[in-house]
Image (tube, rainbow, N blue to C red):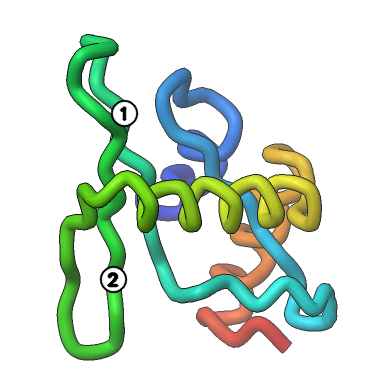
């Protein structure tokens, strides 16, 4: 079951997208983060950002905008969802070693 989760997240979820980026792509993501969007347009976007020693919720719109730009860049540089799922599966098949 665990080995199916990356493919399901990358190819079947309507609300989440897993996008892989190779180590040689030069993208340099600013750490792990998620954009949180609510159904109501009255509630502004938020960011959940993970760092090495903790995590935080960001709601200042200028800071959220910077993460939206980073997400756009990652979207351009990253593999398509199906290719990303294959990259994740390859890493899992190597015991978590990406190289």
Distance of mark 2 from mark 1, alpha carbons? Answer: 17 Å
How far across and how far down the image is residue 71, in percent?
57, 50
Quick one: 58 or 29, which is closer to the camera? 58
Q: Quadrant of residue 27?
A: bottom right
Q: Is residue 59 left or right of residue 71?
A: left
Disc 2 to disc 1: CB gap under 8 Å: no
Q: Secondary structure at mark 1?
A: loop
Q: Please state, as top left, top right, bottom left or bottom right, where the N terminus lies in the image.
A: top left
Q: Is residue 97 above or below residue 58?
A: below
Question: Which circle marks residue 93 in the picture?
Answer: none
Circle 1: is it few (<14), some (14-19), or many (20+) Cα within 10 Å?
few
Which of the pair 47/88 is nearer the observer? Answer: 47
Residue holding disc 1:
37
* Residue 42 location, quadrant: top left
**How far across and down, in percent of the image, does residue 9 sit?**
47, 38
Residue positioned 26% across, 55% down in the render: 48
Rendering coords of residue 81 (x, y %): 68, 39
Extreme residue in the front direction: 62
The residue pinned by badge 2 equals: 50
The residue at 52%/24% (across/down) is 12
Task: Assign the C terminus to one quadrant of the image.
Answer: bottom right
Q: Residue 78 in the image: state x and y as whole percent.
A: 74, 54
Drawn side of residue 58 relative to residue 7, left or right: left
Q: Residues within 10 Å of mark 2 (few under 14, many from 20)?
A: some
Res. 10 image quadrant: top right
Q: Is residue 98 above or below residue 29?
A: below
Q: Earlier in the sequence, mark 2 or mark 1?
A: 1
SS under mark 2:
strand
For image coordinates 37% across by 57% down, the residue present is: 63
Image: 55 above or below 81: below
């Amino acid at each position: 079951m665990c080995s199916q989760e990356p493919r399901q997240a990358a190819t079947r979820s309507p609300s989440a997208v897993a996008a892989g980026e190779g180590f040689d792509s030069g993208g340099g993501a600013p750490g792990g983060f998620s954009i949180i969007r609510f159904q109501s347009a009255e509630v502004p976007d938020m960011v959940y950002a993970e760092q090495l020693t903790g995590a935080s919720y960001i709601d200042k719109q200028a800071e959220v905008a910077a993460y939206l730009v980073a997400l756009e860049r990652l979207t351009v540089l990253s593999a398509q969802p199906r290719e990303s799922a294959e990259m994740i599966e390859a890493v899992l098949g190597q015991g978590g070693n990406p190289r």
